[in-house]
Image (cartoon, rainbow, N blue to C red):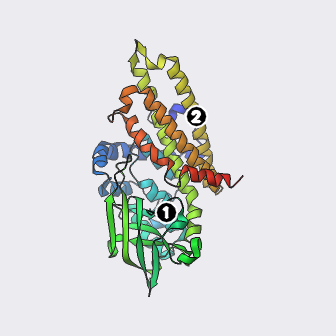
Amino acid sequence: MATNPAEVLGLPKPAWAADEVGMLYDMATRFMAEEIAPRYDEFEKNEMVDRESWLKAGAAGLLCASMPEKYGGSGGTFAHESAIIEAIGHVGVDGFGIGLHNSIVAPYILHYGSEEQKEKWLPKLATGELIGAIAMTEPGAGSDLQGVKTRAEKDGNHYRINGSKTFITNGQLANLIIVVTKTDPEKGAKGTSLIVVETDEVEGFERGRNLDKIGLKANDTSELFFNDVRVPTSNLLGHEEGKGFVQLMQQLPQERLQIGTGAIAMIERALAITIDYVKERKAFGKAIIDFQNTQFKLAELKTEATIGRVFYNDCVARHIAGGLDPVTASMAKYWLSDLQGKVVDECLQLHGGYGYMNEYPIARMYRDARVQRIYGGTNEIMKLLIGRSL
């Protein structure tokens, strides 16, 4: 298999992936292959990647690559974050949750935090001393963020936070959590605020169980409980209350594009390992690749993967230039994750019975791919958002 599974498509690198971005991809690939992959079965069994690996990733410069150097980051762009997420997908360690930490949690602090907040939190996120999560989903509020019930009430120069969250990525390890709360429930979306909770410094915060998922077993996904958790009012993101919903909407395009990153990376890996497999595996006296059905099926998948990569590359270029609109980001999230499910399923079929065995990478990909159509806003919600633009 090619070092970079994307090479199976034979496409030239886009302008945004040249030079130092390509070097970062190579470095991230080596790190994931040497530091994470050998222990990945252990991480799947323990249902989390250990904190030591986060610290190693920080030391290697793989955390907060797009944050400014003055805050401990590498001064890059989303192109650099894409390189890291693609490396994770190409090596096959998809449960390492640094994509959310890097390109979802840290940007909220960069874009909406005060100078004091940025100086306090971003350097520690860059080293891995702080592991980030964002607590949006609740038992009764998933894709509909306006339905959030978690409440933050003023108590002098503090907020008292009460509520519960579920399906929180990095939930067992995270010690910096951006909590979506209602500071004024009567105002609906306009009463929503984002408040940062440093879990090592508060009382009343409790982690629930590490949720038993179908796939992405190495990623800790948890319930979180806030019982009169008191945090300083200075932990509010933004200069005033009620800006949380707007902040979420402004950042969701990057979150949805990031889901597309994971999708195209897994698509390329699935295709690469399947092409290798059908060249080696024999049936009825000849290699499976020599059957016309195999060739036609792989021709279809390679074509669709190529279309997906070209679309993804264009979205990244637009995003770096500041022009990725929410509708196009929704298209990328829904279409690429749908394609991911299709390609992985077809590739598993070409593996035959062995594809259903956990010892084969395609089996893990089949399990891990499914959630992509759900989180970050379900694909049905994506179609609703696209439909509103018509």
The residue mark sitting in front, 2 or 1, is 1
Q: How crowded is mark 1: few (under 14 residues within 10 Å), some or many (20 or more)?
A: some
Q: Which amino acid does label 2 sit on?
A: Glu
Q: Position of residue 75 (x, y in %)?
A: 51, 59
Q: Residues within 10 Å of mark 2 (few under 14, many from 20)?
A: some
Q: Position of residue 23 (x, y in %)?
A: 47, 45
Element at badge 2? helix
Residue located 44% across and 19% down the image: 288
Residue located 51% across and 55% down the image: 376
Q: Where is residue 12 in the image (x, y as percent from the top left)?
A: 58, 36
Query: Which quadrant would residue 1 be assigned to in this image?
Result: top left
Q: What residue type is labelled 1?
A: Ala
Residue furthest to the right in view is 390
Is residue 246 rendered to the left or right of residue 289? Answer: right
Query: Which quadrant would residue 121 be assigned to in this image?
Result: bottom left
Q: Which mark is residue 141?
A: 1
Residue on which disc 2 sits:
304
Q: In this view, does 351 lie above or below 100?
A: above
Residue located 49% across and 57% down the image: 103
Q: In this view, does 390 lie above or below 190?
A: above
Element at badge 1? loop
